[in-house]
Amino acid sequence: MNARNARPHKQSMSELKLRRLTEHNARLREDLARPRIRVSEASASLIRYCKTTKDHLVPSVWGPVGKSEDPYGPQANVGGCSCVIG
């Protein structure tokens, strides 16, 4: 193998590595710029949300759900379609 033939291959590999490192660096900078909050603030916000938002799937905490309030219960048919085959 000729030394001239090996040289461009090494340059392209080093260029590829440089491009990958540059892209990785850009992703890290984007991640660093992302707004953050403290864990204590996030957990307090989550606790506040859970205490104030009624969850129909946890009746042991919120009590029984009325049929009119239950979004997961069977819906009453209001003016539905009917088909008669004869």
Image (cartoon, rainbow, N blue to C red):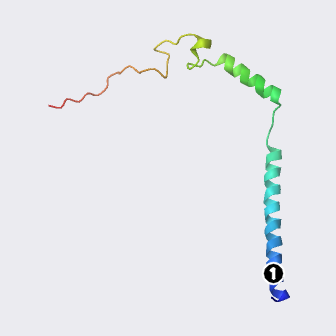
Instruction: Tell me the element at label 1.
Output: helix
Q: In which quarter of the image is the C terminus?
A: top left
Dot 1 alpha-carbon crowd within 10 angstroms: few under 14, some 14 to 19, many 20 or more: few
Question: What residue occupies the far front of the structure in this picture?
Answer: 1
Find residue 8 and report its image quarter: bottom right
In the rendered structure, the answer to whether residue 52 lies left or right of residue 24 reads left
Question: What residue occupies the far left of the structure in this picture?
Answer: 86
In the rendered structure, the answer to whether residue 82 lies left or right of residue 60 reads left
Residue at x-position 31% and y-position 25%: 80
In this rendering, the answer to whether 7 lies above or below 72 is below
Q: How many labels does the image show?
A: 1
Q: In the image, what residue type sits under mark 1?
A: Pro
Residue of label 1 = 8
Residue at x-position 46% and y-position 20%: 73
Residue 83: percent from left, percent from top: 23, 30
Residue at x-position 82% and y-position 61%: 22
In the rendered structure, the answer to whether residue 81 lies left or right of residue 46 reads left
In the rendered structure, the answer to whether residue 69 lies left or right of residue 28 reads left
Residue 1: percent from left, percent from top: 80, 88
Residue 53: percent from left, percent from top: 63, 19
In this rendering, the answer to whether 12 lies above or below 40 is below
Residue at x-position 81% and y-position 66%: 17
Residue 54: percent from left, percent from top: 60, 17
Question: What residue occupies the far top of the structure in this picture?
Answer: 63
In this rendering, the answer to whether 11 lies above or below 28 is below
The one nearer the camera, 5 or 69, is 5
